[in-house]
Amino acid sequence: MEASLPIDEALRLETLNRYRILDTPDEKDFDDIVRLAAAICETPVSLVSLVDRDRQWFKGRYGFAANQTPRKVSFCAHSILTPDEPLVVPDAALDPRFADNDLVTGEPGVRFYAGCPLVTPDNYALGTLCVIDRRPRSLSPSQLEALRILSRQVMTQMELRLRMSELQHASMLLIDRHTTERNQQQALVKERTSELNHVNSELRRSEERLRTLAEATFEGIFITRGGKIVDCNSAAAAMLGWGQEELRGQSIFDFLPETERELARAGGWEGRGTILQAHLRPRNAEERIAEVRSRHLATDRELRVIAMRDVTEQRRTEQALAASESRRREELERVVAERTAQLREANENLQNFTHTAAHDMRSLLRGIISFSEIAREEYGPKIDANGNMLLQRVSSSANQMALLLADLLEYSKMSQAELRLEKTELNLIVKQVVALLDDELKLRDAVVHVVEPMPAVKGHPATAVVLVSNLVSNAVKFVARDKQPRIRISTAERGEFVRLTVEDNGIGISPEDLTKLFSIFQRIHSKYEYPGTGLGLAIVRKGIERMGGHVGVDSEPGKGSRFWLEFQKFVPA
């Protein structure tokens, strides 16, 4: 669904163009921010996105190759509609605004999006700082707050960039204006001299006008011949800490550090319109920083006019801002580290509590099961059929609860356990699974056909056994009672992955049930038809994703199912 336009779209676009940032080269400050956002939010993609008339253009990119995409598929075009709030899309495939979006259905396969609007001081949302993932997920409150902070830093960078651009532009206009006026005066002097060669007084008046103009400017202006100062204004003399008369005859290059002298002598200050930076060493004062423009006089190529503007305080302000930004960034990293440690401690406490509670619940369940069995054996003949049925239900419910508890612990383990991925031989994994399920396979007289050889993959062997066992056990369970289960296990290479497929001749799955099959506590059959807890396939999905892989299924009712796991290929070091 394409986003509607903001009610102030024309003014918003005018404001965006005023920043003169679209289609500019990459800048490290913006690239650092998107890298930091991706690291904090633990996403593979982060962008500084500016929403133009028909496109969204990326000033900063991390994990994304293109520098722009059409506006009609832009998530950020939705986000700028609410400048005061971030837009968080946990699963784009389930959001009616984005489910049919080309960026979701095709490459790069966006599933998760979070974007904080970039809002100007006059409250126009120009774009967002956003993070993107290819899997459904969410952000913690601290991650979302960090994203908000970084979005404000992006806007601060844009404001600084705009102010610097305006200052530089104004400075260039001022220098050009003064140079133009001087050239006009020189042209006037030349014209009057040729016409009234005998009128020296007119020349003196013209020179006085030029001197007044030079003295009126805040910039230091030098006129040199062969590097020697011929003349200068009072601003230039004050910049170097000398009198105007004292400076005449001195070399302008003597006031530069040795590292800059040779460049200046070799013509490094040449170039019409070029602004360079120089470090000046005044008499009895600290070093100053100046922006320098230099050009020869058109009427006398041996004379050079050098205009200098003192930018020392400006540079100090820039350094102070950079230091402040660095301190803010360090503080943010410290806060993130503290929050991460707190979350890790909370997870460990929760895991310890879970195991303790599970142990106590198992003891209770074993007691319920044992006492219900004793009651049925000793008092069954003494109570009626309804009483026996109730005892049977107590025993069955306790057993079902025990299975559910075991699956919940397995799911928790898949979610939190540290998995060290290593070379995993699928041949050995499948053999272990067939051996573990031997009783179950024999009970149903199931036939298992394993297509060998099978390649090695990058995985966690114990986890792989659990996942494949779940799929093979389901392949036996979901076959009609009057049919012999036939299971085929095979592998195939698919790009950077190896796909292991478990194919059965079972009852199949309807299309409407396929979408919810791998969600937690999802059952498509009653527990009386096919026993289970509804957690098995959720465990499979969590386990394979923890190993960097994928899970899927192809199925039709009455024609069996083909469940598959995609493992990363093993690449020897």
Image (tube, rainbow, N blue to C red):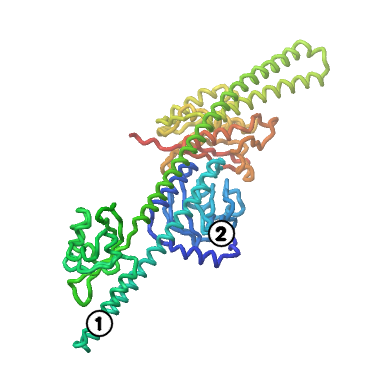
Label 2: few (<14), some (14–19) or many (≥20) C-alpha neighbours in 10 Å: few
Give the distance between the C-alpha atoms of the residues marked 1 and 2, in whole angstroms.
53 Å
| 551 horizontally vs 527: left or right | left
Q: Which residue is mark 1?
A: 189
Residue type at numbered disc 1 = Val
Quarter of the image for the N terminus: give it. bottom right
Q: Is residue 564 above or below residue 400?
A: below
Q: Residue furthest top?
A: 378
- Quadrant containing the C terminus in the rendered view: top left
Question: What residue appears at the point 16 percent right and 67 percent down from the top-left corner?
Answer: 226
Residue 277 against residue 338 in the figure, above or below: below
Helix, strand or loop for disc 2: loop
Frontmost of labels 1 and 2 is: 1
Say which of 244 and 86 sits in front.
244
- Work out whether mark 1 precedes mark 2 in sequence or the reverse, and give the earlier one: 2
Question: Which residue is at a point 20% across and 69% down the rendered structure image?
Answer: 230
Left or right: 245, with 473 as reference point: left
Q: Position of residue 420 (x, y in %)?
A: 44, 30
Q: Is residue 305 visible?
A: yes
How many other residues sit within 10 Å of disc 1, few (<14), some (14-19) or many (≥20)?
some
**Residue sitting at x 41%, y 30%:** 422
Q: Is residue 274 visible?
A: no
Mark 2 highlights which residue? Answer: 123
Q: Where in the figure is residue 559, as x and y percent of width and height?
A: 59, 41
What amino acid does circle 2 point to?
Answer: Asn
The spot of residue 34 in percent (x, y) is: 45, 49
Residue 293 in the image: above or below residue 535: below
Q: Horizontally, is 571 left or right of 279 in the view?
A: right
Please name the residue shown 26% across and 77% down the image. Answer: 207
